[in-house]
Every structure is written in C-alpha cells, then in structure tokens.
Image: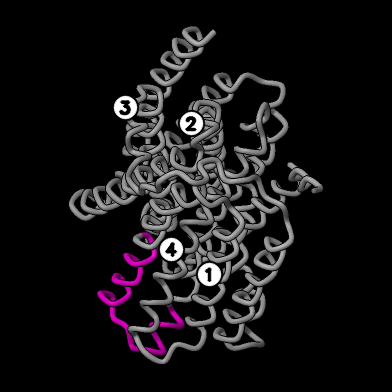
Amino acid sequence: MTARPMHNRNVVFAAACAGMLLFGIVFLSLGSVNNMLAERFLLDMNAIGTLTALLPFGILLGSLVFGPVADRFGYQGLLIACALLVGAGLEGLASADSRRMVQACVFLIGFGGGVLNGATNALASDVSEGDRGARLSLLGVFFGIGALTMPGTLAALSRRYALSSIVSGVGLLALAPAAAFTVIRFPPPKRRGEPMSFTGGFALLKHPVFRLIVLALAVQSGMEGMSNDWMTRYFKLVTLAGRAADEWRAQLGLVAVTAGMVGARLALSGVLARVRSQAVLAVGLALAATGAAVLRQAPCYTASLAAALCLGAGLAPVYPILLSYVGDLFPARSGAAFSTLFTVALVGNMVMNKSFGALAHARGINQYAAVMLGCLALSAGLLILVLKRLRVHRAAEA
C-alpha cells in the first residue's frame, strides 16, 4: 500500500491565510450592513444592539468549540463547514425577510468566524515550527485585508448596485476557500480516537506560563476592541469637537489604527526572524503608549491621525508573539490551548468594552486615551511576568 504524501507546510499556511481573510470579512460584516438591515426591518437602537451582541456571542461559542474538534478530527472538515456557514450567513443577510432570520444569520456568521479565527491561528502555528512569530504576524495581515473587504466593497459599488446584491456577492466569495480546503492535505488529527471534551482545555490554565499569557491576551483583546469600537467616536467628539461635517475625518481615525496594525504585522513577518521577540514587545508597548499619550493631549487632527497610527502599530506585535509562545509550549494540544486562549480573550474584550462604555457615559469619551495608557501599563506588567516565567520554564526543560 502506498503511503499518503505528507502535507505541504506552505500550502497549508496559505489555506490558513485564506480562512483568516474570511474571518476579517466576518468581523466587520455587521457594522457594514446594519444601516441596510435597520432600513429594511425598521430596527431601533435596541434591536441593533441585540444583533451586535449576537455576533460576538457566536464568535465566543465558535472559539470554545474549535479546539477539541480540531484536535480530535483534524482541520479540513472544520474549515470547510465553517467557510460554508459564513457564506450561508451572508447570503441569508442579503435575502432575509424577517428579524428572526437576520438574528440566525448573524449568529451563524459569528460562530463560523469564531471557528475560523481560532482554527487558522492554531493551524498556522502547527505548520510554522521554528518561525511561529513571523508566520502568525503574516497571518494577521490577512485579517486586516479581510476586515477592509466588506466596507471597501460596499463603498466602491454601492452607487451602482443594491447593498443586498453586494452582500450576496461577498457571501459567494466564501465558496472559493471552501473549495480549496477540499483538495488541500492538512496535518492529521493530534488526538484521534481519544475522548473529546469542550472544557478539557481549561485544565491548561494550571500551567503558570499559559495562565499569564491568557491574562495578557485578555487585556490585549480589550485594548484592540476599544480601539476598533471607540476610535471614530473619540475623533468625532474630542479631536474634531463634534463637527458634523467632519464625519469622514472621524472614520479616518479607525482607518489609521487598522492600517498601523496591518502594516506593523506585515513588517513583523520579516523583523521577528532577526530580532528577539522581547525587544519587539518592548518597542511595541512604547509606540502604543506614545500614541495614546499624544491622543490624550487632543492636539491637531493630523497629529491625532499619526497617534492613532502609532497606537495600532504598537498593539500589533502582542498577539502573534504570545500565540507563538503557546504553540511552542503545547504543540500536541495546540487546538485546545488556542481554544481556551481565544475564549478567555473574547470575554476580556467584551468586559473591557462594556466597562469603558459605562465610564464614557459617566465621565465622557475623552477618558479613552487615559484608559488606554492604564491598560498598556497593566499589559507591560503581565508581559514582564510572562517572559520571566517563560525563561524559568525553558531553563527547567533544558
């Protein structure tokens, strides 16, 4: 009997990038179409709020599920199914005729996206031994490309085509990676034949290094979430002092954060091959703190844009570097480890964003920069502890 050929690491990594690009589309899908849905179904703010809660809930559930399934059954079927789920969800949004159908589609998109996010990170880690930080940074670039796909496509085509038709077309794009996943040979399951537990990965939290990494990424996820969700509001009400005519200028604040993060992660894919990750983390924190400090002074618009760019670039290294550490620590249980990590990180994102919303309501949106500086100080302390514990762990294993 002829042995089945081994998987090609570069081809599998390319598949992970395609899946991450699709997750990027998912992440901004609801924000891109909520005006269309609000007009079609006469949604008020409470109804829109329900939808915005369903998307992260679906992502959270997908993050919890993917790890045990990937470790037990492998990646191929999981990626195919969730790419199709995302495509079906987008098609459903385009043609939905009831609020319940919209809610179901938003949940499907979130769940499929949550699985794609976790599974592609774990998969990229599995096929990037010795180069995990650089490869995971490059993977993050594809998230940024995907995140810009939906709003960019809508902006470019909305003058000539109905929004529902454009959303349907984007949904059809999901068929391309799903088809590619069917012919690519993926790594075999790590825990074939073993019992599957959706909570077993949380036992890894007993590991002191992993526990600290999870806490650090919960804070990191919260900071990234606050930057994505509150930057345009901060620019509009603080930097631009609420001038209605400058709405497009406020949107550029978010574009600057996203561009800084995508550009930095693209650069990191080369830098991490030559520079120690500890130094990269230190520079990133300093850059992010500089951006937050400049924003706090509410200077001119151009300086604020540069500050937002610095903030995004400074936040960029933490996720790929810490995920590379987790991949090195648990190569045989990467699915369970990444599943636990992303689940806790998403909870951190939701808690920190909700808490900041309450603070902004009570004290004003101008507190954003000061809160970011405080979070960066907390992140720096956690990262120092992670690096110290990691050195002790490596010395004990040597």
Q: Are marks 4 and 3 in contact (CB under 8 Å)?
A: no
Q: Are marks 2 and 3 in contact (CB under 8 Å)?
A: no
In 3D space, how far apart are the residues under numbered discs 3 and 1 (Cα atoms)? 34 Å
The quadrant of the rendering that contains the C terminus is: top right
Residue at the bottom extreme, as displayed: 97
Asked whether residue 76 is drawn in magenta, I would say no
| Element carrying mark 1 | helix
Question: Where residue 279 sits: x, y (%)?
Answer: 57, 19
The amino acid type of the residue labelled 1 equals Val
Mark nearer the N terminus (4 vs 3): 4
Label 3 Cα crowd, 10 Å radius (few <14 / some 14-19 / many 20+) = few
In 3D space, how far apart are the residues under numbered discs 4 and 2 (Cα atoms)? 36 Å
The amino acid type of the residue labelled 3 equals Lys
Residue at the right extreme, as displayed: 2
Residue bearing the label numbered 4: 111
Q: Nearer the viewer, mark 4 or mark 3?
A: 3
Residue bearing the label numbered 3: 206
In 3D space, how far apart are the residues under numbered discs 2 and 1 (Cα atoms)? 38 Å
Q: Nearer the viewer, mark 2 or mark 1?
A: 1
Asked whether residue 42 is drawn in magenta, I would say yes
- Closer-to-camera residue (6/109): 6
Residue bearing the label numbered 1: 86
Question: Where residue 346 sits: x, y (%)?
Answer: 37, 48
Label 2 Cα crowd, 10 Å radius (few <14 / some 14-19 / many 20+) = some
Range of residues picked out in magenta? 35-56
